[in-house]
Amino acid sequence: MLGELCALTSAFSFSTVSIAIRRGMRRSRDNGTFLSTFVNMVLFLILIGVLYVGRYLPALTWTGFFLFLFAGLLTTFVGRSLHYEAIRVIGPSRAILLRMCSPIITVCLAFIFLSERFSVLQYVGATAIIGGVWVLSRETVGRGDLRVVQAPRSQAASSPQQQEKGALARSGLWLGVLYALGSAMSFGTGHFVRKVAVLEVPSPFWGMAIGTTTAWVAMTLHSMVRGDFRELCRDNFNVHAPPWYFIYSGILNTVGQMFIYLAVFFAPVSTVQVLATSEVLSTLLISRLFLGREEPLGGRVILCSVVICLGVVLMIVG
């Protein structure tokens, strides 16, 4: 029972992260990846330091180190960045639903490289996921009210500017779908690499510390290349007006990752993965409560969420 509670707590934490990120975007041009990953990195480095001093960690090999590094680039750097960008464009509920097709990538890679079998239930589950994603994508690109509404810098905007923003909101939605699907591919590949890394070095704590540190360093270098590193630091490390929602998201991300590993320790992996799909349903509920009209949800979205979640469950138990 403890493992199941940990899995549900993890799913709820990740759902709350998406809502916090969306709320933080209202007053920031940044998507929150830089600061939330920084908070992740600091907390995980403190944890890894405590475990290392207490000699609770296995030896880290160079192969394991580079596998964890690569997994961090795929998941925390690329996957999370694309997912947060999708949240800005199409909202947290639709972004998470589209990201849920990542198990297809993981299972296919495991089938190719680890000789894991692809069962009939997994074929059915993959079909359900693809069908749900297709219907949801068509529903998403047909809307014009999903992009995040930022707080205006002036009290009033001119009518032509409002019309231009409305047209942009409708025309750019397909990019949000691509961001979410790209995030799913990156997370799916990253989870596979992480699985191989844990087989090499049986410690998720090494993976969390190395992965988040690598991702934050990559974000820093990327911002330096773009020339906006100083602005990024000024916005995110502003003592007088800190972006609290992004800080909360970093803490909640850490909590979610810790509880998912605790869940795997106390309960079967298949059970944990099935319960983790409750992230979709809790996101729908929380976004409805805290985002209101900013997150419009209709019958088609709810139906797609049920179909996609069912497909994910079949992929896991199959």
Image: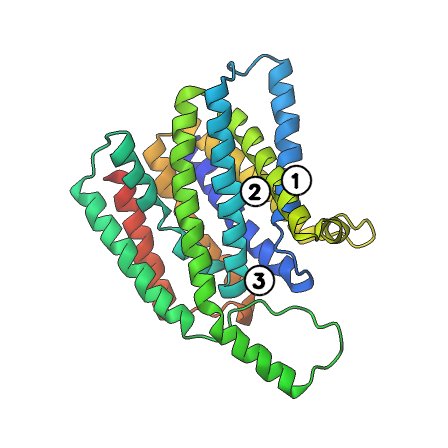
The residue where tag 2 is placed is: 253
The residue where tag 1 is placed is: 39
In contact (CB < 8 Å): disc 2 and disc 1: yes
Q: Is residue 184 visible?
A: yes
- The crowd level at tag 3 (other Cα within 10 Å; few <14, some 14-19, many 20+) is few
Q: Secondary structure at mark 2?
A: helix
The residue where tag 3 is placed is: 290
Residue 2, horizontal then vertical, whole percent: 44, 31
Amino acid found under the numbered disc labelled 2: Asn
Front one among 17 and 282: 17
Q: CA distance from mark 3 to mark 1?
A: 24 Å
Q: Quadrant of residue 192?
A: top left
Q: CA distance from mark 2 to mark 1?
A: 9 Å
In contact (CB < 8 Å): disc 3 and disc 1: no
Q: Which mark is residue 177?
A: none
Circle nearer the N terminus (2, 3): 2
Q: CA distance from mark 2 to mark 3?
A: 19 Å
Circle 3 or circle 1, nearest the eye: 1
Circle nearer the N terminus (2, 1): 1
Front one among 225 and 109: 225
Identity of the residue furthest to the front in this view: 225
Amino acid found under the numbered disc labelled 1: Val
The residue lying at 41 percent from left, 69 percent from top is 140
Circle nearer the N terminus (3, 1): 1
In the displayed structure, 198 sits above or below 244; it is: above
Residue 268, horizontal then vertical, whole percent: 35, 30
Identity of the residue furthest to the right in this view: 240
The residue lying at 75 percent from left, 72 percent from top is 153
The residue lying at 62 percent from left, 40 percent from top is 216
Q: Is residue 16 visible?
A: no
Amino acid found under the numbered disc labelled 3: Phe
